[in-house]
Amino acid sequence: MPLQPKDKSDSEWLKDAGYSGKRGLKNFMMAYGLKLPMDYDEGKRYIEKLRGADQDAWEAAQRPKALASGENKENATPTQKSARLYGGTPETVSRLVRPFKCPGTAAPTRASEKPARKRRKISYKDADGSVEDGDKPYSNEERLALATRDANRFPVFKPKDKDTAFKSRFAVPLLNKNVGEYNAFRPAPLLGMRQGRVFVARPLHDPSGEFAIVLYDPTVDDKPKTLAVEEAKEGEGNGDEVTLDAPVVHKSLADILGLKKKVDDRPKVPVVIDPKLAKVLRPHQIEGVKFLYRCTTGLIDPNAEGCIMADEMGLGKTQSPEAGKPTIQKCVIVCPSSLVRNWANELVKWLGPDAITPFAIDGKASKEVLTQQLRQWAIASGRAVVRPVLIVSYETLRLNVEELAQTPIGLLLADEGHRLKNSENQTFVALSGLNVQKRVILTGTPIQNDLSEYFSLLNFANPNYLGTRNDFRKKFELPILRGRDASGTDADRKKGDECLSQLLTLVNKFIIRRTNDILSKYLPVKYEHVVFCNLAPFQKDLYNYFIKTPEIQSLLRGKGSQPLKAIGMLKKLCNHPDLLDLPGDLPGCEDIFPDDFVQRDARGRDRDVKVWYSGKMLVLDRMLARIRADTNDKIVLISNYTQTLDVFAQLCRARNYGCLRLDGTMNVSKRQKLVDKFNDPDGPEFIFLLSSKAGGCGLNLIGANRLVLFDPDWNPAADQQALARVWRDGQKKDCFVYRFIATGTIEEKIFQRQSHKQSLSSCVVDSAEDVERHFSLDSLRELFQYRDHTTSDTHDTFKCKRCRKEDGKQILTAQAMLYGDTSTWNHFVNGGEKSPLSTIQDLLLRQETAAGCAEVSAVFQYISH
């Protein structure tokens, strides 16, 4: 290429060289191996150098351009000879003078330490000179796009033309319209050409597995057909029957086309518990699960699909009943309000977080929202049932029973079912109105007061199985009670035993009962004590004054009309005199007030509890001080009166003891959080104040290993429920339980009445044959008497042969301790530091034998194992 004349401009010179356009200079520098980026002035100086050079230098500079443009090798000068180097790649020899670079170092290295700038993307479009220089004028479309560039970032939906859209063929809106997966033009299948699939029934889990627990085995548990049914079928087969052809209009489409699904009698398969549950269930719980399944499916008695699980408290009844659920669609669990959240947690704990979604009504939703949720749950069926288990309290179900009255329910499970002991109350009537056949009652105390309450539970589980209430009373209740009475004759006892055995034959088919003795294998030792406490001097004076008032004397002669009020005042007085409004409740008692007594209204800000006014409170104060000083144990204080809990709270504040309180005023949603806080071993609170009416049922207070029941209840079941709060599954420490009884007072009469009821319960429910008849019914009329000079009126009533009459010291131990019979327990009399009470296992009771501590008169002790 000849040298260009110097009178031409740079752009003209580049254009003649074949590098025209906006990027001609940059393309020229890249073609000749110049390092980019290069300053524009430096590029111009390089061009001037080439233009002023001789012909050889120009041609040498033009060689890469000539090679790139594909010129003939004949026209090239001898210095332009190319050779094949490194595997046949055509390269010029002049490339050999360049320094060697490793193949992995293609990326240029920066000599500067400054951060690299972000390179702009370079487009080489129109760099070949095909387009003339100059800016094109903007078109109207470009101006519009430039003006609306921000609006185009968020495009507005433009509807399709209705004429086009309505005439187009419908297409299923699928994301991936693959031909293999979906074909829009494939015609629909013809009617009746495809038969329904027949599923083969198989067990959900392997019945021959390692941990398999089989609830139902068709080879063993299949219901035998009665001979009457078989004979009836044979008679139908022998007779000549005239069959008429059914009209076509009554036939289904499948019958007409002959495509009816051929379903034979489905084979019966075993029902197996989930292996992850079978690994953790204990033997008595496995037995309970099998019993529940057999009862609710009618395998034991076709006429009775309900049952009662009457295990004692702490045996894990709540872990058992879900095994029968696969045979039903919906289940309702009704329980006390404080246990609703606990039930939901237990289902998730044992079945897994994704196995079941319970519908727990814990009181957080409003009335309107709750009604709507219950209606949706009631109308759901089949696969629409996403929350099959409804967990609700007795009160909530009673108020909303109309929403669930029509829906079919597969299983109704009543936890703490002794709430249904009265068939006349609204809760019993509401639950009986539900559309459910399978009913399960969980209760640790099926008999609380009499056999009529026992009949109510039996009649709820299996309606009309034992006849009407009057029939049951005439046939079973009256003969059994006459036989259990201490003044009954031998004929009455014989007749009562016969009726009892007949009743047990009918009932034992659908009731299961296990005692706490089973827990001895899994739990630490429990020491239960009945602590008889003497009245304080001020208490004793008030007690004697009260029973000698004219009102009580006329009541004893049968002329009074308010015995319950008098009984309630005596029970409060046994706890602490501050529970009474003195002198308002006992007019004229000002003369026996001690010198430091101040009336409640005149105390002002002085809230200190005078523990020396009450014998039981004085013993409790010493116990709490010893626990705080020498142990890390926690204790539960239970009372029937919230007023007593108020006194406990004042005592804790005065002694700076940390405590938590749960009674009927606490919101249901907060109760479980309070229990979890107390069970935390690192929590600072070591005292839990509990009302036996509000939270005595079902709570797991295993964070504590000591429990004090401050006052007895007429119903022994209420006391038994309260006493079973700490000795439960999960307890790791030895448990000490104390029942405080005021010596010689009405509390001992209540305790004796409990023993009579428990003997009735043990003979009916526990099937015990040798329950001693200690008390006659006439002896319980001595409620309003006070026996001052005795260590225990109850022990005197026993006529105990194992203790000496002189000092009451026990010389013989019982052959076996029966939990329901305190006459078989160990008996201790507080005779000072050298008495047998000083050797008892509990350090809190040993300290009561010290000098100056005469409040504890006697102790009954029961050891679990």
Image (cartoon, rainbow, N blue to C red):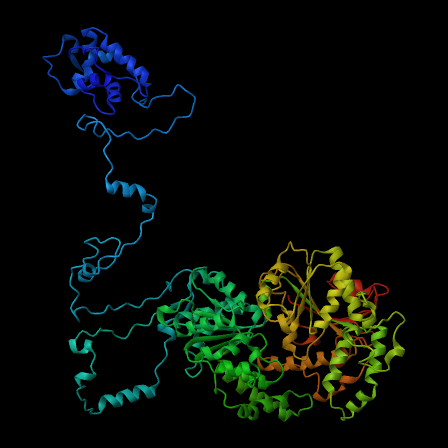
Q: Is residue 275 left or right of residue 575?
A: left
Residue 452 rendering spot, x and y as whole percentages: 58, 86
**Where on the picture, by quarter, is residue 781?**
bottom right
Name the quarter where the C terminus is drawn: bottom right
Q: Is residue 407 above or below residue 83?
A: below
Residue 114 rendering spot, x and y as whole percentages: 43, 23
**Where on the picture, by quarter, is residue 824?**
bottom right
Q: In this view, does 827 lie to the left or right of 242?
A: right
Q: Nearer the viewer, residue 772 or 614?
A: 614
The residue positioned 18% from the left and 54% from the top of the image is: 179
Name the quarter where the N terminus is drawn: top left
Q: Is residue 654 above or below residue 77?
A: below
Asked whether the viewer can see residue 286, the reply is yes
Q: Nearer the viewer, residue 10 or 337?
A: 10
Residue 280 rendering spot, x and y as whole percentages: 49, 61
Q: Which of 603 and 223 is in front in this view?
A: 603
Q: Nearer the viewer, residue 831 or 274?
A: 274
The residue positioned 83% from the left and 64% from the top of the image is: 834
Q: Is residue 49 left or right of residue 3?
A: right
**Where on the picture, by quarter, is residue 337?**
bottom right
Asked whether the viewer can see residue 810, the reply is no
Q: In this view, does 2 lie to the left or right of 812?
A: left
Residue 287 rendering spot, x and y as whole percentages: 48, 70
Q: In this view, does 706 lie above or below 757?
A: above
Question: Which residue in the rendered view is the most extreme toward the left?
Answer: 74
What count of labels does the image hold?
0
